[in-house]
Image: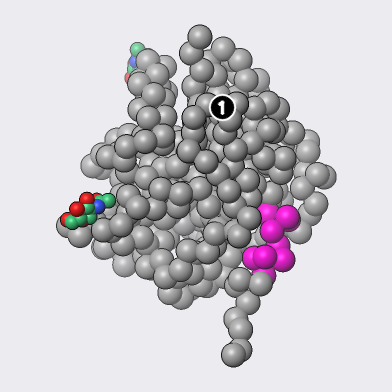
Amino acid sequence: MLRFFIMLFFITNTVAGLSYYIQRTWVKNEKVQNQTLRVQKGSDVMDGEYPYVILIAGITPFKELYRVASGSLITDTWVLTSAHIFSNRGVHANNTLVVWFGKFTESPFITNQYSEVLDIVLHPAFRDMPFISYELFYGINDIALLRVNKINLPVYGKLSPVDHTTLIGLSTIYVGGGETDKLGTDLYRALQVGHGMVIKCGAPVNKWSPYLLCVTPPCPEKKHIPIIGDSGSPFLVDGKIVGTFSVRYFTFTHVSWTAFSPVDLYLDWINEVITPRVY
Ligand SMILES: *[C@@H]1O[C@H](CO)[C@@H](O)[C@H](O)[C@H]1NC(C)=O
Ligand SMILES: *[C@@H]1O[C@H](CO)[C@@H](O)[C@H](O)[C@H]1NC(C)=O
């Protein structure tokens, strides 16, 4: 029996290993399904609608740009995202990681709306492992902060202090701009937004981390097509960030889980990292 596991590590199309394998597997099946490689049932976001939602992108020594993942600017110098994005950091070794903001339908080299990633701060209790099987897998405290040069925006993402256990049953939206399998013109496309309801995660996701929360689409669907490459993107309730997109699991035959790391658990750590210190 085939089971498809999606971990949204999104690096480049040339990466070997788990994320690559999973992406290939999914893309192959996705082509059969003839769906789009976007936020599921998502719609395009207008420029400036969620100005604090950014893309993490790589720039090669040949000045080629590629999308890596998503995140949220929570101050003018700090981005909140997911930690697993950097588990495979070596693939970017020769490249420069940047935060691309503002307009995604045009090259940031033209708009000049990008800023180099200066520091990557993973949560100290973040742990994951290379995927062997879904029974063995785990990925816990999947949260990270990136420091960038100052980015002036009209508004930054606001973190929700609400206890994550009280989010169950609430409607949420998620905004992301993950990598797709397409090259060329598809590099420049709008962010997408999707809607869902917060639920408890079931097996196997609840065994990978006790903290993750899941999101179910507004209408039950037999085939729930994953969003791809949106790792680190925000889940919002009442306009505030309640979590960052961590992991996606689905099978064609039954369940599918889209899981996020709830931010309320990490507020103290976030504040500690982003608060300027006087030495
Ligand atoms: C696949 O999707 C495209 C674009 O939406 C559509 O034009 C085409 O008819 C679809 N093909 C099949 C076999 O459903
Ligand atoms: C980085 O560049 C070096 C020297 O050209 C090369 O050997 C290495 O494979 C490159 N690493 C990656 C991850 O592309």
Q: Secondary structure at mark 1?
A: loop
Determine whether, in the image, residue 231 is placed left or right of residue 66.
right
**Residue for point 39% across, 53% down:** 89
Q: Nearer the viewer, residue 84 or 64?
A: 84
Image position of 129 with respect to 150: above or below: above
Percent x, y of residue 100: 39, 59
120, 161: nearer the viewer = 120
Q: Is residue 270 above or below residue 71?
A: below
**What percent of the width, then of the height, locates residue 264?**
73, 56
Q: Residue at x 48, y 38 (%)?
A: 130
* Residues shaded magenta: 263-271
Q: Residue furthest right?
A: 166
Q: Is residue 15 visible?
A: yes
Image color mode? one colour
* Residue 265 painted magenta: yes
User: Residue at 32% across / 50% down in the picture?
Assistant: 91
Crowding at mark 1 (Cα within 10 Å: few <14, some 14-19, many 20+): some
Residue in the foreground of this view, choosing between 218 and 8: 8
Residue at the limit of the structure toward the top, as seen here: 1
Residue 101 in which image quadrant: bottom left
The residue indicated by pointer 1 is: 134
